[in-house]
Amino acid sequence: MNHQEFQLHTRRVDELIGRVSALADSEARTAALELVQAIMDLHGATISRVLELLEDGGDSGRDWLAQLASDPMICGILALYGIHPVPLEERVQQAVQKLVPPLRKSGLSLQVLGITDGIVRLDLKKEALGLQYSPEKVKATIEQAIREAAPEVVEIVIEGLTSGFVPIAMIQPAIKEGKTYEESAA
């Protein structure tokens, strides 16, 4: 299953949960939702046990665990069950570190300011003058890297990301020797 197929399956599950939640028959709705929860509990416990066995499996087990935990699809499932072996903060830091070289080529640096209640705050700084970059592309690249590493993140706030566009209302007339530009042009 590739990433796109995985996304289609997760959307389908969300759609079906929505349909079950909207059932008029409260007894059927309750039973269906309890069934989904019981299946999730069973899967979560089983996956958690697999992680324990890998952790106890020496270096090769821990290598497998690291490889599984870094896979975008598996990472998402581990985060869903709240059993990802790498803390959220560490995964976000690792994603940011992977972005350092490509951002540096655009004269940019990125730093994690903090993570609170699933909201990741980042600081993007332009370190070199004259280098151009697309704010939209940089934003998309940063968000994709973080969401792959930490799909449970609720929001990503990037401070310092500007488009370079200055709204015309923000431009003030020049003042020369106590006169405004309009007055001196007359």
Image (cartoon, helix red, strand yellow):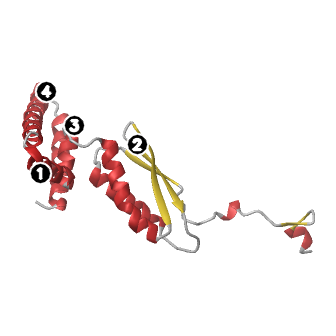
> Quarter holding the N terminus?
bottom left
Residue 82: assigned label: 3
Q: Position of residue 8 (x, y in %)?
A: 17, 56
- Marks 2 and 1, how far apart at CA: 29 Å
Q: Nearer the viewer, mark 1 or mark 3?
A: 1
User: Badge 2 is on which residue?
Assistant: 119
Q: Upstream in the sequence, badge 2 or badge 1? A: 1
**Structural crowding at the residue carrying mark 2, measured as other residues with C-alpha within 10 Å and reported as few (<14), some (14–19) or many (≥20):** some
Q: Which residue is mark 4?
A: 30
User: Which residue corresponds to the image point at 28% horizontal and 48% vertical from the top-left?
Assistant: 151
Locate residue 88 relative to residue 121 in the image: left or right: left
- Labels 1 and 3: the sequence-earlier one: 1
Q: Where is mark 1, residue-wise? A: 64
Count neighbours of disc 4 (C-alpha within 10 A) and say few if under 14, some if 14 to 19, many if 20 or more: some
Q: The residue tagged with tag 4: helix, strand or loop?
A: helix
Pointer 3: residues within 10 angstroms few (<14), some, or many (20+)? few
Q: Residue furthest front?
A: 59
